[in-house]
Image: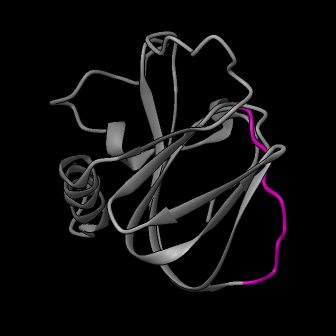
Amino acid sequence: MFRTGDPERFDSRLWKSQHLSAQNRQLTPLYVERYSGARKNRKVYPHSFWEFTVVMNGKGTILAGDSKIDVETGMVALLPPGCSHCEDADELDTIWIGFAGSMINPPKDSSKALVVSNLQLAKMAERLWLFSERRFGEI
């Protein structure tokens, strides 16, 4: 499970097909992961790339920098590079999507998480996760 490090070190299987463009500096997905369960360890994860945290089911809190953000099903948090964060919940089903690239226009205060409630975006994240979980070869 990748959570920290430099995007150059990731070997993203999503971008290895001859039918897709190679990893580029505009936008490169690094990983798509899913976890369901309790979040009580409170270990903080900073990293040098962007991350979407998508809440598929449950309620909890994202501790991001100095902010405490209540989240529930259908909410999506965009966490900028360098923003230390962790989740706190009795039961939470989330998808994490890490990505890097120059295509991203950071908000004015790019040290804070941006959170929206958008079930359509959550469903798109789930489709991406299902697509990335196929183990029958390179995409």
Q: How is the image coloured?
A: one colour
Q: State how many labels appear.
A: 0
Q: Is residue 136 above or below residue 115?
A: below
Screen quadrant of the N terminus = bottom right
| Residue found 64% across the figure and 66% down from its top | 61
Question: Residue at horizontal 33%, vertical 38%?
Answer: 16
Kindly indicate the quadrant of the structure image that contains residue 32.
bottom left
- Left or right of residue 41, residue 76 in this image: left
Give coordinates of residue 25: x percent, y percent. Answer: 49, 13
Q: Measured from the top left, where is residue 98 in percent x and y?
A: 52, 43
Residue 83 is drawn in which quadrant?
top right
Q: Position of residue 105 (x, y in %)?
A: 50, 11
Reply above or below: 128 against 59.
Answer: above
Q: Nearer the viewer, residue 65 or 131?
A: 65
Q: Residue at x 62, y 37 (%)?
A: 113
Q: Mostly what secondary structure, the magenta segment?
A: loop
Above or below for 11 versus 114: below
In the image, 87 versus 127, the foreground residue is: 87
Query: In the picture, residue 8 is in which quadrant?
Result: top right
Question: In the figure, is residue 39 to the left or right of 128?
Answer: right
Q: Is residue 53 magenta?
A: no
Residue segment shown in magenta: 40-48
Measuring from the top left, give residue 117's x and y in whole percent. Answer: 35, 49
